[in-house]
Image: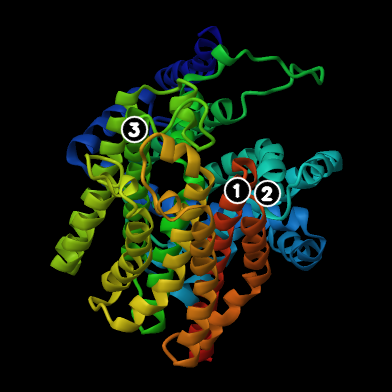
Amino acid sequence: MKNRLLQLISPLILLVLWEVLVSTGILDRRFFPPPSETLRKLAQLLESGALVTATVVTLRRMAVGFVVATALAVPIGVLMGINRAARALLAPLVSALYPVPKIALVPMVVILFGIGETSKYVIVVISVFFLVAINTLAGVLNVEGRYFDIARNNGARGWDLVWTVALPAALPSILTGVNLGLGFSLTVIVGTELLLPQGGLGALIWQSYQLYDIATIFAGLVVVALLGWGFNLLMLEVERQLIPWRSDGQGRVAARRPEEEPRVRRLVRTWWMAVRPFSFTASVTPVVLGSVLAGYDGAWSWPLFAVTLVGSVAIHAGTNLINDYYDWKKGADTPESLGPNRALQQGMLTTDQVFWGGVFFFALGSALGIYLVATRGMFILWLGLFSVLAGWFYTAGPFAFAYTGLGEIVVFLFMGPVMVVGSYFVMTQQAPLHVIWIAAPVGLLVAAILHANNMRDLEGDLAKGKRTLANLLGRRASKVEYYFLVGGSYVLLVMLVVLRVAPWYTLLALVTLPSAIDLIRTAAIYETPQRLNKVLRGTAKLHERFGWAMILGVVAAIVARVV
């Protein structure tokens, strides 16, 4: 509290000194209106709505450019940090372009993108990208090599090294770049609006200058300063929540007991664990696949893609939570289970919290679905309605799909053809048969994930009265089903390409075949839950890589068609 009060002293001293200097005539009132007059002008602008409108326009331009730039800069910075070839290729370009004054690029950007909103977004993207990328690169390069060695010795490979070592260790530097980029994006967009006065705070300041309305100029500058100050406070709080470890100035890191963890960080971490984000690839992959297939057929919309993706992930998160709730209530999940239900197992959340969390995510997904129904047609309503019902009754009710041997069928249908066709329909308002067939290999692998889970829990589920295909078929036949689901996805993909249903570029997914063969061999040999748990994780990764390889294949087909 004391530090926060001290932060207010210097601005207050400046305002009082400013008012006194103008009142005594030391500063010319014509050029330096006192704070009291500036505040009156602020009140007038707020009452008229002009200031709110200008601020909203500036914040929208800033937010879009900042988000796009950060989303590009962080992965590229990490890639340069962990890969020497990428660093040798990209670092000189980043270092050379970073010092170029970004405002000087405005004329070229206008020539390329016109004087509309796109040019404003592009200027912010260019300005923020280099700040964030360079700080991310520096953060990754400063990570001690022994941490990567320890991770490799514990089995981490590829992206595991990024998620478990590179990103956490580089996070302070990344957030520093994000903080600088956030402030710089505000500076750049206001400067761009001065050069291209088409709404926003910069345009308000420029128009006031032309009318010699000095008080309005200062009012605009005060708003810009307050926004910058607010963004800095926001980022400081984000850093405090995300990286609570900080040195005490002597190279020592202060210890933090679990109960001292910041409340917001603990809340985010708990719910992040509860919704199981690692499983979201099962919903993200089919949505992206359906969308790029629509792009291959000549239809694409970024806003519709974003709404569809977020809505699908929300339904998936709600399904995870409701499934965990009913599995826990029915006794299928216990504190000794190997499954991912850690939020309930460790007492982080109550059953009621998990239930209402699931309801919230279902409501969020449904709200986005209603928008798609209103804009794209009633077909989306039926797909969305059945998807929500399937997610809810997967474990709910006396005849839950997961408890009557129907789990694999439901998962195949709704996380394969339904999601792919749904995202395709959002773009094209059509649901052709060939899209259903192309979705089938991905659906088979999603079903394989669930079946691997059921193979692992075969005896336990049987003892608790949970009937799955794995324990209905028995150990030997359940292995055959796993071979069919995994191997069938590759056979079906090749057939679709041979029959010219799918672009031949989608055969890129065959690069994952060695991993599939290894998983089939492991499932054939081992029967212990610990070994089959690795098969489950490997199958989830296989689905992700197979699906994204198909997606890249469709994108390559689009590029080849354009070229």
Q: Nearer the viewer, mark 2 or mark 3?
A: 3
**Which structural element holds mark 1?**
helix
Residue 331 at x, y = what percent? 37, 29
Residue 303 placement, left or right of 561: left
Residue 469 placement, left or right of 337: left
Pick the residue in front: 396 or 186.
396
Residue 51 at x, y = what percent? 28, 42
In the rendered structure, find residue 160 and report the number of the disc placed on it. Answer: 2
Residue 448 at x, y = what percent? 48, 59
| Three-letter code for the amino acid on which mark 2 is drawn | Asp
What residue do we see at 36% from left, 22% from top? 350
Sequence-first tag of 2 and 3: 2
Real-space Cα separation, disc 1 to disc 2, in angstroms: 20 Å
Among the 4 quarters of the image, the one containing residue 505: bottom right
Real-space Cα separation, disc 1 to disc 3, in angstroms: 24 Å
Q: How would you rate the neighbour count of disc 1 (Cα within 10 Å): few for under 14, some for 14-19, many for 20 or more?
A: many
Give the residue number, with chain letter if any, for mark 1: 532
**Which structural element holds mark 2?**
helix
Sequence-first tag of 1 and 3: 3
Count the marks: how many? 3
Q: Nearer the viewer, mark 1 or mark 2?
A: 1
Give the residue number, with chain letter if any, for mark 3: 325
| Three-letter code for the amino acid on which mark 3 is drawn | Tyr
Residue 280 at x, y = what percent? 45, 51
Is 500 placed above or below 455 here? below
Pick the residue in front: 189 or 133.
133
Residue 103 placement, left or right of 135: left
| Three-letter code for the amino acid on which mark 1 is drawn | Leu
What residue do we see at 27% from left, 49% from top? 365
Pick the residue in front: 487 or 539.
487
Is 523 placed above or below 250 here? below
